[in-house]
Amino acid sequence: TPESHASTVEVSNDVVLASWFGGTKEKNKDVVIWVSRKSNDKWSAPIEVVNGVQDDGTQYPCWNPVLFKPNGGPLYLYYKVGPSPQEWWGLYMTSQDDGKTWSEPVKLPNGILGPIKNQPIQLENGTILSPSSNETVSGIWTIHLERSEDSGKNWSKTEPLNDPKEFGAIQPAIFNYGNGKLQMLSRTENEVITENWSEDEGKTWSKMTATALPNPNSGIDGVTLKDGRQLLIYNPTDKNWGDRVPLSIAISKDGKDWKRVLDLEPIREITDKEGEEYSYPTVIQDANGLIHLVYTWNRKTVKYVTLDPKKLN
């Protein structure tokens, strides 16, 4: 496809899967969800797994797939369909064979959008916490958390966790510090990554505040590593700089003091930066400790990277 964006990655029984939306251009009705599987060190040719064709023949674009494998459950593929982020709705499919075949789409309940960009997390008691957000026709951006205590069968959600007059925030990423302590970091319109904290497994949250991390109004993601550190992927610029480049990794022990340790895509000395974009990362850590991440490469394709966290000092 001419354009690919909003990729996601997951591991299911040692098979690495990536998914993204692709078509002629974001928001065009021919944009569908694609999946590729990496087995025996080779990626399969991308396969279209679902589109936005409705019962009456109308076709809407697809958006923001999110792969997620809960403990003991099937592989989930959450995604959105609709003419715009202001009007989309959430759906999911499941796979029992590590992404070879997929169930028919299931629409999420009214008011539940599913994970908007970044993966849910699963607590030790099995509770699934899904970071989500809303964009309204009037331009209001708010984040919230969706919660399931029965393996995704039923969902509840919090009220908005930010005052849009202070921060216009979407697409949170969630970190788990243990003993009920959680952190959400969010993309904003305000040139900064913001944070919310919870001490009760996400039932209640602190007021949204700014971090010291810049944000050019671009998606972020992160993961709590098995060694207790937090890993964040982000574009370390503000919107005044312009492009979504560089794309970097920062590490923190406490979620407050972040150290930029690696540029996945550094700023290059080129004469024409038009169209240069490295953005919308997704990151996971597998059972063996290896980090897998994907991101949009120049808005044309998806790049996949693996990292050894022991070398991120």
Image (spheres, rainbow, N blue to C red):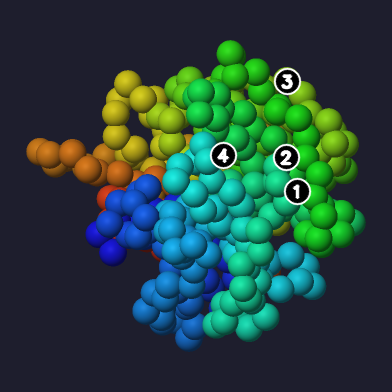
User: Is disc 1 surrounded by few (<14), some (14 to 19) or many (20+) residues within 10 Å?
Assistant: many
Q: CA distance from mark 3 to mark 2?
A: 14 Å
User: Is disc 2 surrounded by few (<14), some (14 to 19) or many (20+) residues within 10 Å?
Assistant: many
Image position of 228 (left or right of 217): right
Q: Position of residue 154 (x, y in %)?
A: 82, 55
Q: CA distance from mark 2 to mark 4?
A: 11 Å
Q: CA distance from mark 2 to mark 1?
A: 7 Å
Q: CA distance from mark 3 to mark 4?
A: 17 Å
N-terminal label among 2 and 1: 1
User: Is disc 4 surrounded by few (<14), some (14 to 19) or many (20+) residues within 10 Å?
Assistant: many
Task: Judge by depth and name the residue closer to the eye, 68 or 101.
Answer: 101
**Pointer 2 with pointer 1, Cβ within 8 A:** yes
The residue positioned farthest toward the bottom in the image shown: 40
Q: Is residue 306 above or below residue 83?
A: below
Q: Which residue is mark 2?
A: 145
Residue kind at label 4, given as amino acid type: Gln
Does the rendering let one see residue 159? yes
Q: Which residue is mark 4?
A: 171
> Residue drawn 79% across and 73% down?
72
N-terminal label among 1 and 3: 1
Q: Which residue is mark 1?
A: 129
The quadrant of the rendering that contains the N terminus is bottom left
The residue positioned farthest toward the left in the image shown: 271
Q: Position of residue 110 (x, y in %)?
A: 71, 46
User: Is disc 3 surrounded by few (<14), some (14 to 19) or many (20+) residues within 10 Å?
Assistant: few
Residue kind at label 1, given as amino acid type: Leu
Q: Position of residue 266 (x, y in %)?
A: 31, 43
Q: Say which element carries label 2.
A: strand
Q: Which residue is mark 3?
A: 207
N-terminal label among 1 and 4: 1
Task: Judge by depth and name the residue closer to the eye, 267 or 203.
Answer: 203
Residue kind at label 2, given as amino acid type: Leu
